[in-house]
Amino acid sequence: MSVRTIRLTTAQALVRWMAAQRVEIDGKELPYFAGVWAIFGHGNVAGLGEALAGMSDTMPTYRAHNEQGMAHAAIAFAKANRRERAMACTSSIGPGATNMVTAAALAHVNRLPVLFLPGDVYASRRPDPVLQQIEDFGDATVSANDCFRPISRYFDRIIRPEQILDAAPRAMAVLTDPATCGPVTLALCQDVQAEAFDYPVSFFEPRLWRQRRVRPDEAEFDAVVEALRSAQRPLIVAGGGVLYSRAEAVLASLAGQAGIPVAETQAGKGALAWDHPQALGAIGVTGTSAANRAAREADLVIGIGTRLQDFTTGSRTLFDGTLFQVNVAPGDAAKHGAQCVVGDARTVVAALAQTLAGWQAPKAWQEANAAAVAEWNRAFDVATAPGGELPSDAQVIGAVWRQAADDAVVVCAAGGLPGELHKLWRAKAPGGYHVEYGYSCMGYEIAGGLGVKMASPDRDVFVMVGDGSYLMLNSELATSVMLGAKIVVVLLDNRGYGCINRLQQATGGRPFNNLLADTRHDKLPAIDFAAHARSLGAEAEKVTGIAELEKALARAAASTTSYVIVIDTDPMITTKEGGHWWDVAVPEISIRSEGAAARATYEKMKKGQSR
């Protein structure tokens, strides 16, 4: 029996195959790949560029201004889509490829799917060394794309056209698997991209990929049920896996019926509406006083879909109770000596709700948590109330939150803002809180906001960013204008790296090289951020104080294009309530008395570390 074939270049075949991959979301079948971000160069323009141009109606191509930025946008798109859809990114072989490495690491840490298609050297090696080629005289197989190996969940270098018949489905299996989900890299040798092969027609037939929901082992499930029934002070810690599994509704039901309090990680924030009776808010280093009190007193802690990052556990000083981990990834489920429950979050939580019907946590525990939440709400009101000569981050957050619609999305990534947002942003709906804090990558914010807007065009997107992150990577603001993907950027100018300046002093150091005033300089730049934003095509203005900010937010809401609002803030003020110790090593020897005092505190706190 003969096999029907079609002759295509490797690049043409790959793009056609990508267009055939499908997923089902809310009963509707959609393309898995929503498009390809591309900055063309000599390593991909002739091969993959030609293939994308021929499929532009079914596989949209988006042009960006920076390879790292376009990859951040793709990653944010996937996160906003609960990992159910993704995008691809292609670049030339040299700096274009290595520009994407930081984003690949970000996707790996955050377990988010993105397909990287960097151009690579010639498989034939006949013209070596080609422009931008990295030469290793000890290993002729090395190229710049090898940088992607440790930060890809699956890596392959395509050196023959027929290899994509195996590599492409393996890539898709990783991208769509809840346990292994993360970045995939297919390095495309530039001569192979242009080579033709007779591909079987069946390779391009539509393929529907379904979300796998792993059921827990019976013994593991029974163990967590028994632990809950015996607990006097149980606590659930909701991580990003709750949202990726779309388990927020069943979690809200379980927490409500059983009276189990729920605290949230950065990735899990929004799993419960902020005013749910059992919602304690953020946990850990940037946690609320209510959540961290419960964490210290809990005799049972059940993590659901969290990788237990140090900010969540207070560098392993926060939890004293028995720890269970519900997670699709066995490696995460076994962390910190936890008792494992390997399974899909929604499946496990729904089973817990059914099994525990009629059971409730002790009333005294519920009442204590309700009182702690009321106390925290009073602290929230104080922290976010307008006042003072220069506003704090908290006051700016309060203003944005008051102006935001119930389904609005706030986007942030690095510096002091994620900590204040984790504490203070009151998530009203799932997906309304989008903070990249696994990699805490400065420069993610604006590109990430663009990706969120592309994923959720009907939702308002507020990007909160410091002056330091804005200066690192702002070029995708122009892309948002070009694509008509409106975002509202609130730029908090504290004249430097205010968060690290505070950490520097908290660990005994003197202010040095963080705030602009503390750097080596001849003359400090008078940066007009509003003028810069306008030069990229956005509307922009600078305001003074919270009252002016709220009026500007109303003007931004009425605008039809991306809008930037700049406001000066105090670099030293943070919310005093809540929070927890974080393990940042302090020098054992210091010439400053402040350093010696910080070391003594550090040694004292390390004695409380467990697990």
Image: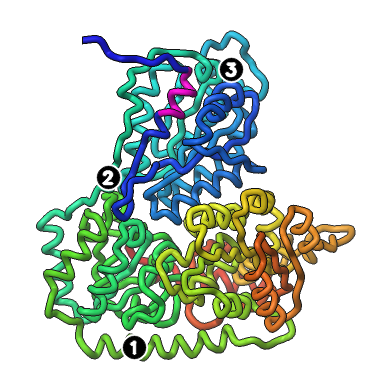
In the depicted view, which residue is nearer to us: 428 or 498? Answer: 428
Q: Mark 2 to mark 3: distance in Å? A: 45 Å
> Is residue 81 placed above or below 349 in the rendered structure?
above
Disc nearer the start of the sequence (1/2): 2
In the depicted view, which residue is nearer to us: 164 or 505? Answer: 164
* Residue labelled with disc 3: 137
Q: Secondary structure at mark 3?
A: loop
In the rendered structure, are the residues bearing label 1 and label 2 in contact, judged by CB atoms less than 8 Å apart? no
Pick the quarter of the image with the N terminus. Answer: top left
Q: Is residue 429 inside the magenta stretch?
A: no
Disc 1 marks a residue whose amino acid type is Ala
Pick the quarter of the image with the C terminus. Answer: bottom left
- In the picture, the disc for residue 210 is 2
Q: Secondary structure at mark 1?
A: helix
- In the picture, the disc for residue 59 is none
Would residue 305 appear left or right of 105 to someone viewing this image? left
**How many residues crowd around disc 1 within 10 Å: few (fewer than 14), some, or many (20 or more)?**
some
Disc nearer the start of the sequence (1/3): 3
> Is residue 579 placed above or below 104 in the rendered structure?
below
Residue 453: percent from the left, percent from the top? 54, 57
Region of the chain picked out in magenta, as a range: 9-16
Q: How many discs mark residues in the rendered view?
A: 3
In the depicted view, which residue is nearer to us: 191 or 454? Answer: 454
Would residue 498 appear left or right of 315 to someone viewing this image? right
Residue 359 figure quarter: bottom left
Disc 3 marks a residue whose amino acid type is Phe
Residue 209: percent from the left, percent from the top? 29, 41
